[in-house]
Image: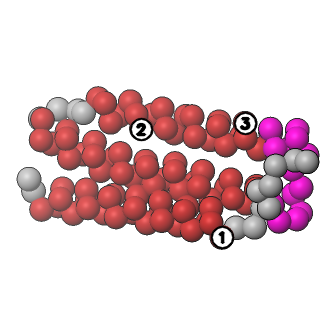
Amino acid sequence: MPFVLELVISLFLVAGALFALIGSIGLARLRDFFMRLHGPTKASTLGLGCLLIGSLLYFSFQRGGLSVHEAIVTVFLFVTAPVSAHMMAKAALFRGVDKDGPSRNYPDR
């Protein structure tokens, strides 16, 4: 495998891991539901997208052709992650989740 390709794959993998780490920290540290929803959604799209692109490059080079599995998973990820985040935000708005105060993660009583 050429060194340049190894470098590109490594950069995608490290970038994906960093985005996933930042999203995890955002999920733990942000104060309300809508902020918590934003961090992991962006991190999953960018982080997992970078990891899948790195995997696509690696297996495409190893097998001598385009790795269709990673390409399909990447396309589905980029289509479904924003839609699912939008649906969760709409459900939270419908349920009346407080946008200004911190969420306590307690069930309704």
Which of 55 and 97 lies nearest the eye of the viewer? 97
101 inside magenta stretch: yes
Q: Secondary structure at mark 1?
A: helix
Of helix, strand and loop, which one carries label 3? helix
Instruction: Determine the CA span between mark 1 and mark 3.
Output: 22 Å
- Label at residue 87: 3
x, y percent for residue 108 = 87, 47
Residue 3 among magenta residues: no
Judge from the rendering whether residue 98 lies leftward or rightward of residue 50; answer left or right.
Answer: right
Which residue is at the front of the view, 54 or 87? 87
Q: Quadrant of residue 73?
A: top left
Q: Percent from the top left, x then y, of residue 49?
A: 43, 47
Q: Which residue does the image show at 34% across and 64% down from the upper left?
A: 14
Q: How many marks?
A: 3
Residue at 12%, 35% in the rendered image: 63
Specify which label sits upstream in the sequence, 1 or 2. Answer: 1
Q: Within 10 angstroms of label 1, few (less than 14), some, or many (20 or more) residues? A: few
Highlighted range, magenta: 90-103
Q: Disc 1 or disc 2, which is closer to the eye?
A: 1
Q: Which residue is mark 1?
A: 29
Question: Mark 2 highlights which residue?
Answer: 74
Q: Amino acid at mark 1?
A: Arg
Q: Amino acid at mark 2?
A: Thr
